[in-house]
Image (tube, grey):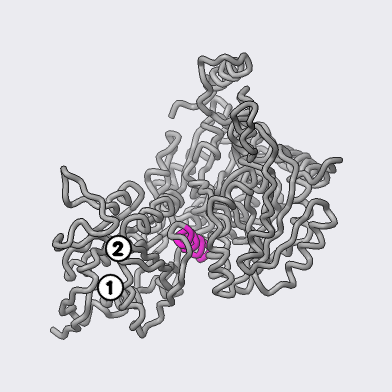
Amino acid sequence: MKTLRMTMAQALLKFLDNQYVEFDGQQNKFVKGIFTIFGHGNVVGLGQALEEHQGEITMYQGRNEQGMANAAIAFTKQKNRREIIACTSSIGPGALNMVTAAGTATVNRIPLLLLPGDSFACRQPDPVLQQIEHAHSYTMTANDAFKAVSKYWDRIVRPEQLMTAVINAMRVLTDPAETGAVTLCLPQDVEAEAFDYPVEFFAKRVHYMDRLSPSAASIDRALEIIKTKKKPLIVTGGGTIYSEAAEELKEFVEKFNIPFAETQAGKGILPWNHGHNLGGMGVTGTAAANVIARDADLVIGLGTRFTDFTTASKWSFQNPEVEFLTINVNSMDGEKLNAKFILGDAAASLKALTQKLGEIGYRSAYQDEIRAVKETWDQEVDRLFSIELPDGLSQTRALGVIQQLLQEDDIVVGSSGSLPGDLQRVWRPVKPKTYHMEYGFSCMGYEITGALGVKMAEPDKEVYCMVGDGSYLMLHSELVTSIQERRKINVLLFDNNGFGCINNLQQSQGIPSFGTDFRFRSAETGRLTGEVMPIDFAANARSYGAKTYTATTVDELKSALEKSRQDSVSTLIDIKVVPGTMTGGYESWWRVGVPEVAQRVAVLEAHKLMANEIQKVRKF
């Protein structure tokens, strides 16, 4: 047997450089690069291996470990999970900074390979800098925190263990049903230890992401349900996009006259103005989707996890005769809501159902309802886009201006706060993959880092990050990386002086504004009730080297958008919007824990209302 003597870190890179995936006959090199912030847990081992590596893995320098991992997630999401950028960090704080990103990847079913440095496997220098010790178990380190948010976790304590570890890692990373964060902990001494690795270990490996065809029996069972229903509704999620099932969905809804609503991950699969597209579903959904959902007698979940925002905490579907049918590659998602379940790829399953339903001449009983709710909703969006205020820009007016000036190929990125709700309701994408929303974890700080990842995946397109001032302050350091890499992103920062989304939530439940505005501490009250803190976000971004603008009027915003498009470096437009001018709920409800005991009557009334609505929800 021929062997190559290499350190574990060198062998890891050589292996990763030879991994490929194949989907529908098209092969992609899987690992395109590695984000790193070097420290004492990885700079001498993996860092040395990267410096000498002669392959095609590009090293990118991060600024914050969570930020670079978020960027890696966004890159992979935009690439439909067929290309990844790995991430490595030092031990201790550097590693733990990636835990939130691991949760984001796992919740969203996005493959993310994390390579945190770890303490010494030999234990001789212990405790080393940044090592956490446990008296009850010396095997535990900070990296054990990744177990709860990883789909696969391993610690390589001998160099030969690398082989089984990375093969299992690739198994999970390329599994559409079970993918998520994969964490391989790398003790810093083992990174540098050598082993005689078999040459065949480094041979090109192709991981086949074959479409999962549904069984004939499951299609027949679905047919028996659908043919008895008059008003079905499809809820389409991210799985439909990863399946690239746009044409199959289009044929299905048009042939059988079935409307569809979108989750955040599924938005944009078909154009916003398609005759059967009702827009966003659930808590942050449109009135069109939620009105149709209320009376639907069948809900077909297509590649969706049915989160509480999609189902309005299981409140949306009020028809006593409603049943659920799911199509998913993941059995846990498929079994939700007591659904009848087709285990299969979205495109393959829709094809099979289209043939069977066509044979019996099925068509829904909808008449003008779909057209009517769409027309009413389109008028409402036009109204929201045109709201003029005497004291400044409303958030929806700003979005209307942006929608007007952006082009069809431009990509918008978002994640948290009030903007995802507004965007799911009012944004009008025409082309697939131009709406990139991380709302499985709603991770604050994803927006700018995600925009960088999307730009790395789509270098020829303009990428626009939609971010609130609260989320910007949490994490924006990869704006510097975008400038370093000459990957221009456009940051549209909506400054409403605080955590506006949560401020809106607390006040809607009878609680006065408390701890959600950005105000100075008052000498009189001792609380954060003083003047609003003036923050010049444009000045902050300008200090990094970005081109910046400030907009307080429609004309200023239009001018900034037009000028920023011509800039060659990353830009930031500091948009000052009037607080509380986001969209509200439309025919939806969200379950939150409203206090049963409180001094304020408004809170007690909110509790009664919440308890009343809870009686209307499905129990499982």
Tell me if 120 is positioned left or right of 296 in this view. Answer: left
> Who is closer to the viewer here, 75 or 270?
75
Question: Dot 2: what SS?
Answer: strand
Q: Which residues are magenta?
A: 67-79
Examine the structure image and report whether residue 72 is included in the region drawn in magenta.
Answer: yes
Quarter where residue 462 is shown: bottom right
Examine the structure image and report whether residue 425 is included in the region drawn in magenta.
Answer: no
Tell me if 213 is positioned left or right of 493 in this view. Answer: left
- The answer to whether any part of residue 361 appears in the image is no
Q: Amino acid at mark 2?
A: Gly
Q: Amino acid at mark 1?
A: Gly
Residue at figure coordinates x 77%, y 55% from the top left: 551
Give percent across and percent down for residue 617: 52, 25
Marking on residue 117: 2
Magenta-drawn stretch, dominant element (helix, strand or loop):
helix
Pointer 1: what residue? 45
> Who is closer to the viewer here, 520 or 396?
520
In this view, 229 is above or below 448: above
Question: Dot 1: what SS?
Answer: loop
Residue at figure coordinates x 42%, y 61% from the top left: 211
In this view, 33 is above or below 279: below
Quarter where residue 434 is shown: bottom right
